[in-house]
């Protein structure tokens, strides 16, 4: 990533106003730094040479105090706004990464991207804050304070200006040399964090199985090794950052000392005035400071820069399996009255010699119950993913109300769809929070939906009823109870199209009757219900049964 990547301005709109503020405050600080040095010299020099008394320069001292106060205020505003801007940009990027990953679908995530995306969205992007709070301000100051200060020194004494110009390039040269090593260390640290996160995610997902088999202690060594590797790479990054900071500090101090010695000798021999000499000695550190801070703060923010680059890599990927996704600009038609036509649909499974589904043609009428049936791996869930615009078809296509699905705006389509996957999304919070009921929904509709799905008996068995706290992924409920919760959520405010992926997969025969009742209720309310099912009890409800088949012989 470049010091200021244009993609950051494109993906994070909050960064634009912040950079505008930095430019304004950078110009103000440049003027204040110069005024401060000149006022100090103007106050001290005449008093030392005896041409004026302290009373004569009292007004300059008062102005100097005001300049000090203004500089403190500008710096405070810059840093305070920087923290807020950083949090807004991080939240914006995190939302876009999660949304983009979701739009790509499960196939995209299954290609080894799940752990890296989770790590990026939950932890890595937080490292971007030092980049905004520390690095970017110093970049702006380098472009404002340094040249303006150098111009004033040139006006005061051209010899000192030449000395600074000779020393100044040393800092960026060493900064680039050390920065390359730091960037590699930061990228290595991010990959180590991703490996550790992936191992922990896999371990948590399979912990119940490992414990049932008595193997819960087996991954301990692997997790320990990954943790030590991450700690080692973190310490290496910090070591390089501290080393580079020390090098840059030494170069800036040495350069300032050379200018100070040169000015001091010329003061002794009377080749430069006291006012100009004092001003140059005070302005020289200010000329070097922004460039020095850019180097040290870049290393402090290198982890965030690496994370930002990883976010751009995800956001730059086109949505879907094709490299040239079609423009989705047409609003979705009303799904309550629109027929969905599937024409010769085929989807090639990536990395496998499988076409699932193969040459599927069917029609889904509005307000009907349609069942997709077929053996495992035949492409039932893939068909639903194509309908949700999560997977691009290899051949054939789908029309909705006579409009090509590829040209329909995704957001307008999703606003009319309720999708209940096999593993429904349940967030930490109360049971009631997970129903996502707005102010227009009454408790009566909630209780009616819970009665139809049999979730009312589940709520009655919970210690605090609807206010019972659930953990991540629905911890506190069994798998079947989570499925009932998702069905209840779909029933409270049913949308025109409801897609149910194996709604009775984790339920017994008695509980299956509740699913059947929920499906009938959805159809009675005018929703088009698409059910992916294996069990006959659900298939028998459907007035339209579509058989999905796969082919492993024709895939190239």
Image (spheres, rainbow, N blue to C red):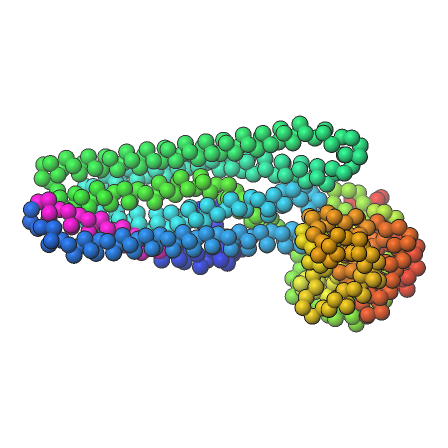
Coordinates of residue 55 in the picture (x, y in percent): 11, 53
Query: Which quarter of the rendering shows the C terminus?
Result: top right
42 drawn magenta: yes
Please determine whether, in this image, residue 390 is positioned above or below residue 302: below
Q: Quadrant of residue 555?
A: top right
Coordinates of residue 479 in the picture (x, y in percent): 79, 48
455 drawn magenta: no
Q: Check the image and name the residue furthest to the front.
A: 463
Q: Nearer the viewer, residue 171 or 219?
A: 219
Q: Nearer the viewer, residue 84 or 233?
A: 84
Residue depicted at x 74% and y 45%: 350
Coordinates of residue 206 in the picture (x, y in percent): 74, 38
Is residue 280 toward the left or the right of residue 105 in the image? left
Q: Nearer the viewer, residue 544 or 237?
A: 237
Coordinates of residue 421 in the picture (x, y in percent): 77, 53
| Chief secondary structure of the magenta portion | helix
Please determine whether, in this image, residue 162 is positioned above or below residue 470: above
Instruction: Give the magenta range.
Output: 25-49
Q: Nearer the viewer, residue 265 or 216?
A: 216
Quick check: can you spot residue 380?
no
Is residue 206 toward the left or the right of residue 246 in the image? right
Residue depicted at x 63% and y 45%: 118
Residue depicted at x 30% and y 53%: 71
Is residue 134 toward the left or the right of residue 430 in the image? left
Tag count in the figure? 0
Q: Quadrant of residue 231?
A: top right
Residue depicted at x 32% and y 43%: 289
Quick check: can you spot residue 115?
yes
Please determine whether, in this image, residue 182 is positioned above or below residue 146: above
């Amino acid at each position: 990533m470049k010091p200021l990547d244009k993609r950051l301005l494109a993906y994070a709109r909050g960064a634009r106003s912040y950079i505008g503020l930095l430019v304004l405050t950078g110009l103000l600080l440049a003027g204040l730094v110069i005024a401060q040095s000149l006022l100090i010299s103007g106050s001290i020099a005449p008093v030392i040479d005896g041409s004026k008394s302290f009373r004569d320069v009292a007004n300059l001292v008062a102005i100097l105090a005001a300049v000090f106060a203004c500089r403190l205020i500008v710096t405070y505003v810059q840093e305070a706004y920087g923290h807020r801007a950083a949090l807004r940009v991080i939240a914006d990027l995190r939302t876009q990464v999660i949304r983009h990953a979701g739009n790509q679908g499960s196939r995209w995530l299954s290609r080894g991207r799940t752990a890296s995306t989770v790590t990026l969205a939950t932890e890595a992007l937080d490292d971007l804050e030092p980049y905004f709070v520390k690095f970017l301000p110093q970049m702006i100051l380098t472009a404002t304070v340094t040249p303006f200060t150098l111009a004033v020194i040139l006006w005061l004494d051209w010899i000192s200006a030449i000395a600074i110009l000779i020393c100044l390039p040393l800092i960026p040269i060493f900064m680039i040399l050390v920065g390359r090593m730091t960037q590699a260390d930061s990228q290595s640290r991010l990959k180590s964090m991703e490996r550790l996160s992936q191992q922990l995610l896999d371990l948590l997902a399979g912990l119940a199985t490992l414990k049932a088999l008595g193997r819960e202690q087996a991954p301990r060594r692997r997790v320990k090794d990954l943790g030590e590797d991450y700690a080692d790479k973190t310490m290496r990054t910090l070591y390089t950052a501290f080393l580079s900071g020390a090098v840059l500090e030494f170069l800036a101090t040495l350069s300032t000392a050379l200018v100070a010695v040169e000015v001091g000798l010329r003061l002794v021999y009377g080749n430069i005035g006291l006012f100009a000499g004092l001003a140059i000695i005070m302005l020289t550190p200010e000329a070097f400071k922004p460039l020095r801070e850019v180097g040290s703060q870049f290393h402090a923010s290198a982890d965030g820069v690496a994370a930002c680059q990883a976010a751009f890599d995800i956001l730059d990927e086109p949505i879907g399996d094709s490299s040239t996704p079609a423009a989705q600009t047409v609003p979705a038609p009303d799904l309550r009255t629109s027929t969905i036509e599937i024409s010769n649909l085929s989807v090639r499974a990536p990395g496998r010699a499988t076409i699932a589904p193969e040459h599927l043609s069917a029609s889904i009428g509005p307000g009907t119950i349609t069942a997709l049936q077929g053996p495992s791996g035949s492409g039932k869930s893939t068909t639903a993913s194509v309908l949700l615009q999560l997977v691009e078809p290899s051949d054939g296509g789908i029309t909705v109300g006579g409009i090509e699905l590829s040209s329909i705006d995704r957001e307008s389509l999703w606003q009319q769809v309720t999708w209940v996957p096999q593993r429904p999304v349940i967030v930490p919070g109360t049971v009631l929070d997970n129903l996502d009921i707005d102010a227009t929904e009454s408790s009566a509709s909630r209780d009616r939906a819970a009665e139809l799905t049999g979730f009312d008996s589940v709520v009655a068995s919970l210690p605090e009823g609807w206010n019972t706290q659930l953990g991540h992924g629905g911890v506190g409920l069994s798998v079947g109870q989570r499925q009932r919760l998702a069905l209840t959520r779909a029933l409270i405010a049913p949308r025109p199209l409801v897609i149910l992926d194996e709604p009775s997969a984790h339920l017994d025969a008695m509980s299956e009757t509740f699913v059947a009742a929920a499906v009938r209720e959805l159809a009675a309310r005018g929703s088009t219900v698409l059910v992916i099912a294996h069990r006959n009890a659900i298939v028998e409800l459907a007035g339209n049964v579509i058989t999905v088949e796969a082919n492993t012989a024709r895939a190239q």
